[in-house]
Image: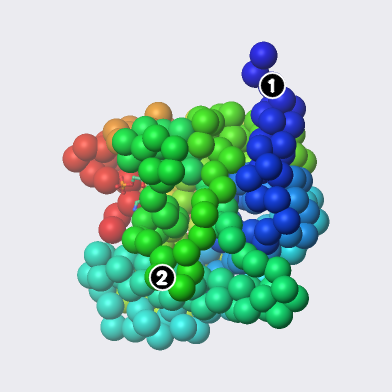
């Protein structure tokens, strides 16, 4: 019978058999899949696993702490964080085209991850152990989509970029490749991961970088992070997390409108709320969030985030609108 406990037991055994004494590396994205995959491998082989977390500065409020503090506390994983925030901002300077931004973020991500992997390999080599395996949070639908039998899995970073260079060839460990998303969540809970990680809604790899319409800057990221945190807090408080697939908050950074805030006239930016309901993100409908919840979000954002003087609601289904604005 299928139980999360059985899956954990089976996978722990399978991972031990596959990995033996070798060392293993895993990239964490902040998302559910990589977290559960890493936690399973940690359960199986403990400190043979090193996790690498690239902080690209494009995550939402609290998400870095979720990985560095809560994930580590609940699993005991050995974690290397790379603070690459300045590097990503520098690479994104002047970029406004959505696909350019995605490419830049994907390229920088893979470069930073590769360097971190090399460092882990070098450090372990000094101790005479070999890093032979890379953990991937590939799920069953990914396997089916890539037409894959065993071994057919591609390197699927959360940016969907291509393979790793020759000097970083790893065998893949994919403990989730028979599981659907809801099963992955059940396994994550079984492993004692925090609910905030297990129930995290989908969030794009390029993160807030594609939710700032226009150039990404440090100041704009701070504004968007603050507005997004308020929206998420209020939606969660209203008990809507399970009704909403995800709710991008989008900063229209190059658009200004006139407002009155506090003592005077302001010329600030709008943010867009984009709550959607969906089964698989292929199609989506805009979620009918109760007006009083929308009102609270709007009031709080315009009170607490001085740069934002207008909150607007996106009432477009997908198609024709995509979920993200970029
Ligand atoms: P769209 O905007 O195409 O989004 O309706 C569908 C789903 O995919 C997510 N998304 C991305 N995820 N890298 C990702 O890892 C990306 O570049 C990307 N673009 C969109 C989006 O959040 C939604 O869940």
**289, above or below 59, in the image:** above
Q: Are marks 2 and 1 in contact (CB under 8 Å)?
A: no
- The image quadrant that residue 250 belongs to is bottom left
Q: CA distance from mark 2 to mark 1?
A: 39 Å
Q: Is residue 235 left or right of residue 320?
A: right
Given residues 303 and 234, the one toward you in this image is: 234
Task: Give the residue at mark 1.
Answer: 3
- Give 95 or 183, whichever is nearer the viewer: 183
Q: Position of residue 304 (x, y in %)?
A: 57, 65
The residue most toward the top is 1
Provide residue 68's location: percent of width, then percent of height: 70, 64
| Residue 62 placement (x, y as % from top left) | 64, 61
Indicate left or right for 152 with 30 as reference.
left
In this rendering, is residue 37 above or below 162?
Answer: above
Q: Is mark 2 within 8 Å of ligand 1?
A: no
- Left or right: where 169 falls relative to 241: left
Pick whichever of labels 2 and 1 is earlier in the sequence.
1
Task: Give the image location of residue 225, x and y in percent.
Answer: 52, 65
- The residue depicted at 25 percent of the width and 70 percent of the height is 100
Q: Which residue is mark 2?
A: 166
Q: Is mark 1 within 8 Å of ligand 1?
A: no
Q: Residue at x 77, y 59 (%)?
A: 47
Q: Please tell me the numbered disc located at residue 195.
A: none
Query: Residue at position x 19%, y 40% from top?
Result: 320
Residue at 27% from the left image edge and 46% from the top image edge: 322
Can residue 14 be seen at all in this image of the molecule? yes
Dot 1 falls on a residue whose secondary structure is: loop
């Amino acid at each position: 019978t299928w139980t999360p406990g059985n899956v954990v037991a089976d996978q722990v055994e399978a991972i031990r058999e596959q990995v033996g004494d070798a060392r293993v590396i895993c990239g964490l994205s902040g998302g559910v899949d990589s977290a559960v995959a890493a936690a399973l491998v940690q359960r199986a082989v403990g400190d043979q696993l090193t996790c690498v977390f690239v902080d690209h500065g494009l995550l939402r409020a609290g998400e870095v702490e979720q990985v560095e503090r809560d994930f580590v506390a609940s699993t005991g994983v050995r974690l290397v964080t790379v603070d690459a925030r300045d590097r990503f901002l520098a690479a994104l300077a002047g970029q406004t085209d959505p696909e350019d931004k995605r490419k830049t973020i994907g390229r920088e991500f893979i470069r930073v991850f590769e360097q971190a992997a090399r460092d882990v390999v070098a450090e372990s080599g000094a101790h005479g152990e070999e890093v032979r395996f890379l953990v991937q949070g590939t799920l069953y639908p990914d396997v089916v989509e890539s037409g894959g039998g065993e071994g057919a899995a591609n390197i699927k970073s959360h940016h969907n970029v291509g393979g790793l260079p020759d000097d970083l060839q790893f065998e893949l460990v994919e403990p989730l490749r028979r599981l659907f998303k809801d099963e992955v969540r059940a396994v994550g809970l079984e492993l004692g991961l925090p609910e905030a990680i297990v129930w995290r809604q989908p969030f794009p790899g390029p993160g807030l970088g594609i939710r700032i319409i226009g150039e990404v800057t440090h100041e704009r990221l701070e504004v968007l992070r603050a507005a997004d945190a308020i929206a998420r807090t209020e939606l969660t408080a209203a008990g809507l997390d399970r009704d909403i697939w995800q709710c991008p908050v989008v900063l229209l950074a190059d658009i200004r409108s006139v407002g009155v805030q506090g003592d005077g006239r302001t010329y600030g930016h709008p943010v867009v709320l984009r709550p959607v309901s969906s089964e698989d993100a292929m199609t989506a409908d805009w979620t009918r969030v109760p007006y009083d919840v929308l009102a609270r979000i709007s009031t709080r954002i315009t009170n607490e985030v001085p740069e934002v003087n207008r909150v607007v609601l996106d009432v477009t289904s997908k198609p024709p609108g995509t979920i993200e604005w970029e």
